[in-house]
Image: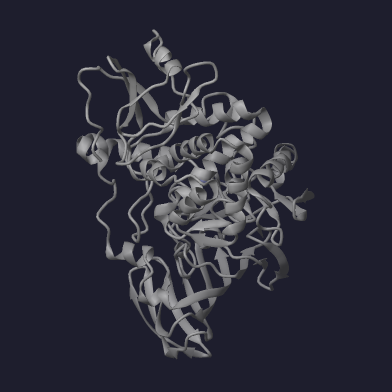
Amino acid sequence: MQIRSMRRAALIAPLLLLAGAAGARAQNHAPFTRADSLRGSIGPARAWWDVTFYDLHVRIDPADSTIRGWNGISYRATQPGRRMQIDLQMPLEADSVVMNGRKLAYTRDGNAFFVDLPAEQAAGAPGMLRFYYHGRPRVATNAPWDGGFVWTADSAGGRWIATAVQGLGASAWWPNKDTQVDEPDSQRIAITVPGPMMDVSNGRLRNTTKNRDGTTTYEWFVKDPINNYDVAVNAGTYAHFGDTYAGESGPLTLDFYPLAGNLEKARRQWQQVKPMLQCFERWFGPYPWYADGFKLVETPHLGMEHQSAIAYGNHYMNGYRGRDLSRTGLGLQWDFIIVHEAAHEWWGNNITSKDLADMWVHESFGNYAESLYTECQQGKEGGARYQIGTRASVQNDEPVIAPFGVNAEGSGDMYYKGGNMLHTIRQIIGDDEKWRGILRGLNSTFRHQTVTGQQVRDYISRQSGIDFGKVFQQYLETTMIPVLEYRAGAAGVQYRWANVVPGFDMPVRVMGGTSGELLRPTTEWQTAPAAVAAAANSAAGLRVDENFYVTAKKVGADAPRAPAAF
Ligand SMILES: [Zn+2]
């Protein structure tokens, strides 16, 4: 999703005023609770089993905003174990947990249930239990950011229901192993709603069953691994049209579900899907879900990267709700929700971060994909201008990476700052075909997998042949933007990095001479070549290639400061 950053900024700013500068540097996280650790870490009741299949069946009753159902959880023991942690958030209630016709004993610890199986499971053994539950799920107060269930009506007065639970967690509406680490290999999603509503969930529609009580059950099936937070209900009065895209892996089915009253608008606006797919397949490799198809579904909230069923609520306008987040005008040339959310099919859904702390793997590449799409439309210079334009939204309030193991997210800078870090890395690699190969290689190497951010960092360094360790550390783990300091003195013009982590040695292009010169500064003073010195001594001063996300500063020759300590 997008613009949690702005939400966060709005929420956090008053806290910062109270806390002062020291608070600004500290992690803006409340003290972590036992519940955070149960959700965010792989404890002993999670570690021994691997989810293989979720068989989810939920009946939705809009009359009293309740749901009732069960999830069949199939698993394989990767090591011997007996106690299973299954997450289901309050105020939902468990009815029973059943294995082989036997009710199992369980205890509840807040949002986590600890279920005792009849016997210890042997390593390698498969198993299956059913978790029955019901209740009134948390209602979203500001979906998709403060998520949960959305119960609303469309402009024609028809009921309209949707779920959006990223961050909050899938266990806000269905019982599962609520961590990004473990995805099922496939999943059924059978949703029962009153007529005349239709439910559009993820994957492909296998069956539609008209029940005697006037409800209809829509049975969707996802053939590939899916993030639990991507599993979604979208129920309303939908129209449908379809198309086929001739993609890198063959024909890809496109299915579109606008509200019935918006069919003509959708037919126009959603034509942007094909050029988006063409651009992203070129840069990132084949769309990751040919088996499950591509869908856009209109939702009452702004949007979300629900796998193979992108939630769309951008009101058929270009930009982000009609605005351009880059302030260049280029962001008004395309529909932000189509481009950004679909980018997550590669970054977030195909490659999923194991820990919420590493959400930059989703959002930094999501933001960067926006500038690549602009590049596909407008050329390389336009893409760069878009990316650089988003820099104005960077807060540098706290690091992009949050504490691990406690279900915490880092700064909203994971979007614009992370995207600009990737744009900078592309400049340093200096070979667009190699860079494109790295982006595609990430998607093929980690296809349908969950990863640590470190794996992504290491892959980029290894494949480029350049050690980006310090660059990632600088931009993801600190709030400092590198400063290229330079000074003119008896020894000529000298330069070095300041405001950086120890050992920071990122190359940077400065605009001395005719085409720019690549400097290799460290935290020690070095003497500049003649063309750079001439530029530095000019009235305009030294100019850094703005594709590099750094600043430059002239300092006095006689009072050199030590580099900022980290
Ligand atoms: Zn996003």
Q: Which residue is drawn at 63% across and 36% down?
A: 373
Q: Hey, which quadrant is residue 356 in on the image?
A: bottom left
Q: Is residue 177 left or right of residue 320?
A: left
Question: Residue sitting at 33 percent across and 28 percent down?
Answer: 496
* Residue 323 seen in render: no
Image coords of residue 65 (percent x, y) = 50, 61
The residue positioned 35% from the left and 34% from the top of the image is: 522
The percent coordinates of residue 26 (x first, y second) are 25, 44
Vertical order, 323 against 213 (above or below) = above
Q: Is residue 258 left or right of residue 543?
A: right
Q: Is residue 72 above or below residue 17?
A: below
Q: Position of residue 265 (x, y in %)?
A: 71, 37
Q: In this view, does 386 lie to the left or right of 554?
A: right
Nearest the viewer among 325 and 67 is 325
Q: Across the whole image, how many numbered discs are drawn on residues?
A: 0
Q: Is 238 situated above or below 182?
A: above
